[in-house]
Image (tube, helix red, strand yellow):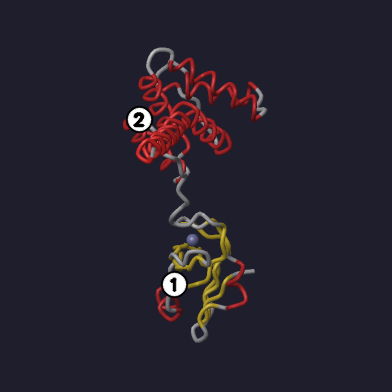
Amino acid sequence: MAIVIDRDRGIKSELEDNIALECPYCGVYAHMQPQSVPDASLLLRDKPKHVGLVYKCDSCSAPVFLRFAVREYTENTVELYRNFVELERPKERFAFSYLPQHTEVLFREALSCYSGNNFNAFASMCRRAAVSAYHMLGEGGKLRAFEEVLVAQDIAGIDDESFAPIKTVLFGSGPHEELPLLNRAQAGILLEVLKDMFYQCFVRHGKLTRALKVRRFFVSEAENDHAASA
Ligand SMILES: [Zn+2]
């Protein structure tokens, strides 16, 4: 079933409800309604191979730009293939504020490579972000991180063979040129493992320290009040 833009009637409505995807703005898997559809008469005149439509996210109303390949031009209609390219992919999220600054810069770039489907650029940036993290953790930091990753492997039940390239990216001591080539599935594992490692090494510590500081503050405020009223 294709999407049809008619010279007189615009986009055919029965297909509108069928587009649903993860919104790059709100992150919700939502239905999308066409918001801006190109003029069919201009398409019929120029006959481009690809057509861009702006959809509106049902959840947050943000504009989402999709590109479709044209299947066929008839005298009065433009028929599009249903497959589309998302011009903006959802961004991977992380509690970046808990990371050391240098690690944060590198990990943000790693996630942006991942969102753009550049999985080997992603792997290279993961190596750099990880090395920066070991440096910031100080003496014994790399070993501690390694132990966290082994725990993650165990929890996730990933066998050693599938896990070997992930370990090489994160802990190998060879140069960048020797990093293994990763496919989409392996990059996905690397992403989750590195997020978990950073969580264990930085975010957990940062969150707990902050929460305890707030608790201590309220306890001392309460003690001051008590002393003042006594
Ligand atoms: Zn949205």
Q: Which mark sits nearer the N-terminus, 2 or 1?
A: 1
- Residue appearing at x 53%, y 35% in the figure: 187
- Residue drawn where x is 64% and y is 69% of the image: 1
Q: Nearer the viewer, residue 97 or 172?
A: 97
User: Tag 1: residue type?
Assistant: Lys
Q: Which residue is mark 2?
A: 100
Q: Residue furthest bottom?
A: 8
Rendered location of residue 2, percent (x, y): 60, 69
* Residue occupying the point 46% across, 44% down: 93
Q: Mark 2 and 1 residues: CB-CB less than 8 Å, in contact? A: no
Q: Nearer the viewer, residue 210 or 69?
A: 210
Amino acid, disc 2: Pro
Categorize mark 1 by other alpha carbons within 10 Å: few (<14), some (14-19), many (20+): some
Q: Give the x, y percent position of residue 100.
A: 35, 30
Q: Quadrant of residue 192?
A: top right
Q: CA distance from mark 2 to mark 1?
A: 51 Å
Mark 1 element type? loop
Residue named by callout 1: 47
Query: Which element is circle 2 on?
Result: loop
Up-down: is 60 above or below 185? below
Visible residue check, residue 109: no
Out of 96 and 48, give the one closest to the viewer.
Answer: 96
Most extreme residue toward the front, as rendered?
230
Q: Is residue 202 above or below residue 226?
A: above
Q: Is residue 208 above or below residue 53?
A: above
Q: Residues within 10 Å of mark 2 (few under 14, many from 20)?
A: some
Looking at mark 1, is its residue's CB closer than 8 Å to ligand 1? no
Nearer the observer, 205 or 224: 224
The quadrant of the image that shows the C terminus is top left
30 sits to left or right of 208: right
